[in-house]
Image: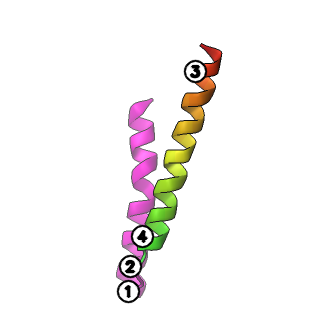
Amino acid sequence: MLSIIALLSDLPMYIADIVTKLTGADMSAFLDMANKGMAGAIELVERILTQLG
């Protein structure tokens, strides 16, 4: 389970790296958004599991 989360959290970095290499665009805002979204999703799952258990 944790390895799946780790792979999914690295996916935006790989996408941003490819886009940066192809276009030269700065993708730091995209990475910030993706990281905050992933953190929010993990916190939501933790809250749900806390309420259930």
Magenta span dominant secondary structure: helix
Dot placed on the residue nearer the N-terminal end, 2 or 3: 2
CB-based contact (under 8 Å), mark 1 and mark 2: yes
- Quadrant containing the N terminus is top left
Of discs 2 and 3, which sits in the foreground? 3
Of helix, strand and loop, which one carries label 3? helix
CB-based contact (under 8 Å), mark 4 and mark 3: no
Name the residue located 46 percent from the left edge and 55 percent from the top edge: 35
Q: Between residues 33 and 4, which one lies in front from this camera angle? A: 33
Q: CA distance from mark 1 to mark 3?
A: 43 Å
* Residue annotated with mark 2: 20
Of helix, strand and loop, which one carries label 4? helix
Left or right of 13 in this view: 40: right
The amino acid type found where label 1 is placed reads Gly
**In the rendering, at what x and y percent does residue 42 appear?**
52, 39
Determine the image quadrant of residue 49: top right
Q: Which mark is residue 24?
A: 1
**In the rendering, at what x and y percent does residue 43 appear?**
53, 38
